[in-house]
Image: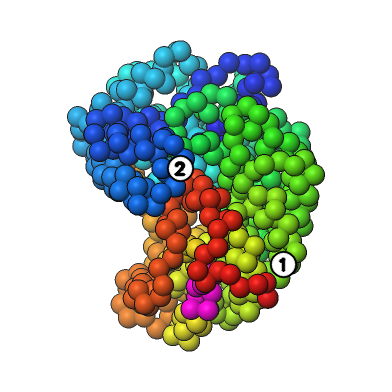
């Protein structure tokens, strides 16, 4: 359920201004399920009784059809690329854009705003905007916002897509309030728009210092949308920006701004309000990093209110997550932590400026598992400075940690322009050889912030193959390790529901006492 849209809806509600909301992604999936009996059965299962949903065998059998839905969406994406390139509008894509266009225009809006959280969504958004402008001759002004707008060049986007009226970067509440108040795009901080001289920028976005002044996100429209979960699961945030903010590889600092936090009691009260309004007791924290101090205060607030909830956070494996804190967090309802571990090599962790120690990380994972918290490791392969020794150190760390881990992501290192690695590649043995095009619009490429690169000592001019090689070696090694629990590979909402169900149950290899 899109939190960004709910945050903007709260701005409109606080001003008593009526707006329409539409989750195009959900509508697309529902349409696919309506047209395919197997996908329809999958949807029925996902929305069915929780007990059946938590049966791994039944889940695997019913959700296996998800791949067919993904395949259909991939086909639509290719049609979208052709349409944006000027090579015609395919029948299936035309039907989708017409259906969504009718829904978007049903109340004759003056402004249509697209919230683009992920760059993967941009192609469909651009295709829809082009369809509204060229096929339907819609008189509305089209504005793009969302986190993905900070991951590309807005000037390049506007030059390529003339049907887009403006692009807003940064957090959305302040510019959205300005739009609702009737201000022009030229009066809104962080906005890119066209005038007679071309594309104009109004400067840096405005970032709110005090998050407690924001209204509670309004899910009243979206909550009844029929998402693919057996019970409500809602996104929530305690902080914006990263409190650590020093990792040399991380591009999120460009998208989310400086660190600020809401009072933990305010967050707990919001969780209570969601429970009272929607019967929701499962919450997915979208914070980049919930540090130990904040987790402690949030846990205290939840326990003091005797709130029955379950939640997930993202964190760094530092020793400040003590056994006592992890036990308190588990009592408060924390049943899953996604750990930004990145590597088991201390040399690479230091080079990344991660601020963690491999040995302390192992103890944190073991202690979290001992109190029933599900551990998901987020690992990066092929990072700058990696070699056989670093990979062996990572493998050794994973071998030791494996009994205390429920899930793991193995990501290839990506070089982003607005990071320390990207600004000073030569310091880290990297050579930039090009940029990354995400979509071509009528012969005009739109790039993201990814940089194509090779490493010192590698032959030829092709992109570095190191990350792919390391991931391949890891997958071969992983085949010899015990299989991880079933839920470790599920999407975030479903993982959370399984982690809740399994928290109180003993699991093989996860019964050791805290170190």
Does residue 354 show up?
Answer: no
| Number of marks in picture | 2
> Badge 1, how many Cα within 10 Å: few under 14, some, many 20+?
many
Range shown magenta: 398-404
- Asked whether, in this view, residue 15 is left or right of residue 25, the answer is right
Q: Which mark identifies residue 315?
A: none
> Badge 2, how many Cα within 10 Å: few under 14, some, many 20+?
few
Relative image position of residue 39 (x, y in whole percent): 28, 37
Which quadrant of the figure has residue 250? Answer: bottom right
Q: Which mark identifies residue 323?
A: 1
Q: Which residue is drawn at 70% across and 50% down?
A: 332
| 1 or 2: tag closer to the N-terminus | 2
Task: Name the dominant secondary structure of the magenta segment.
Answer: helix
Give the number of the mark in front: 1 or 2: 2
Extreme residue in the top direction: 107
- Asked whether, in this view, residue 14 is left or right of residue 413, the answer is right
Q: In this view, does 179 lie above or below 62?
A: above
- Depth check: give the residue in front, 110 or 40: 40
Q: Which mark identifies residue 51?
A: 2
Which quadrant of the figure has residue 72? Answer: top left
Between the residue at mark 1 and the residue at mark 2, the CA separation in whole angstroms equals 31 Å
Q: Is residue 59 above or below residue 115?
A: below
């Amino acid at each position: 359920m899109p939190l960004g849209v709910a945050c903007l809806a709260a701005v409109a509600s606080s001003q008593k201004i009526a707006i329409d909301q539409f989750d195009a992604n959900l509508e697309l999936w529902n349409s696919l399920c309506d047209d395919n009996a197997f996908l329809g059965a999958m949807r029925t299962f996902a929305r069915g009784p929780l007990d059946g949903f938590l049966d791994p065998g039944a889940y695997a059998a019913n959700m296996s059809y998800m791949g067919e839905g993904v395949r259909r969406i991939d086909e639509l994406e290719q049609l979208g690329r052709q349409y944006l390139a000027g090579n015609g509008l395919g029948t299936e894509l035309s039907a989708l854009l017409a259906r969504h266009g009718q829904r978007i225009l049903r109340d004759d809006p003056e402004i249509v705003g697209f919230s683009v959280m992920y760059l993967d969504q941009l192609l469909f958004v651009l295709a829809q905007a082009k369809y509204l402008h060229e096929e339907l001759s819609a008189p509305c002004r089209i504005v793009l916002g969302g986190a993905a707008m900070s991951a590309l060049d807005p000037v390049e986007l506007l030059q390529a897509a003339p049907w887009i009226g403006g692009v807003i970067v940064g957090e959305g509440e302040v510019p959205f309030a300005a739009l609702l108040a009737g201000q022009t795009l030229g009066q809104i901080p962080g906005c890119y728009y066209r005038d007679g001289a071309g594309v104009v920028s109004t400067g840096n976005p405005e970032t709110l210092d005090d998050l407690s002044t924001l209204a509670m996100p309004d899910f009243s429209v979206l909550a009844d949308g029929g998402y693919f979960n057996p019970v409500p699961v809602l996104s929530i945030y305690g902080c914006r920006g990263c409190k650590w903010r020093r990792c040399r590889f991380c591009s999120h600092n460009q998208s989310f701004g400086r660190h600020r936090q809401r009072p933990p009691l305010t967050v707990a009260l919001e969780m209570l309000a969601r429970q009272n309004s929607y019967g929701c007791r499962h919450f997915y924290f979208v914070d980049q990093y919930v540090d130990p101090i904040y987790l402690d205060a949030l846990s205290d607030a939840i326990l003091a209110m005797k709130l029955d909830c379950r939640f997930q956070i993202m964190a760094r494996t530092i020793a400040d997550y003590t056994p006592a804190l992890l036990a308190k967090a588990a009592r408060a309802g924390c049943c899953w932590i996604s750990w930004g571990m990145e590597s088991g090599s201390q040399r690479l962790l230091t080079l990344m400026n991660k601020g963690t120690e491999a040995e302390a990380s192992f103890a944190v994972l073991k202690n979290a598992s001992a109190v029933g918290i599900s551990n998901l490791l987020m690992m990066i392969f092929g990072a700058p400075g990696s070699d056989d020794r670093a990979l062996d150190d990572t493998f050794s760390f994973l071998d030791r940690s494996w009994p205390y881990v429920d899930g793991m992501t193995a990501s290839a290192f990506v070089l982003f322009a607005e990071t320390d690695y990207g600004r000073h590649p030569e310091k880290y043995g990297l050579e930039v050889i090009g940029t990354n095009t995400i979509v071509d619009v009528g012969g005009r490429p739109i790039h993201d912030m990814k940089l194509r690169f090779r490493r010192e000592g590698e032959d030829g001019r092709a992109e570095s193959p190191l990350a792919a090689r390391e991931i391949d070696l890891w997958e071969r090694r992983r085949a010899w390790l015990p299989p991880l629990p079933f839920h470790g590979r599920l999407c975030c909402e479903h993982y959370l529901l399984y982690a809740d169900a399994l928290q109180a149950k003993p699991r093989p290899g996860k019964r050791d006492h805290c170190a």
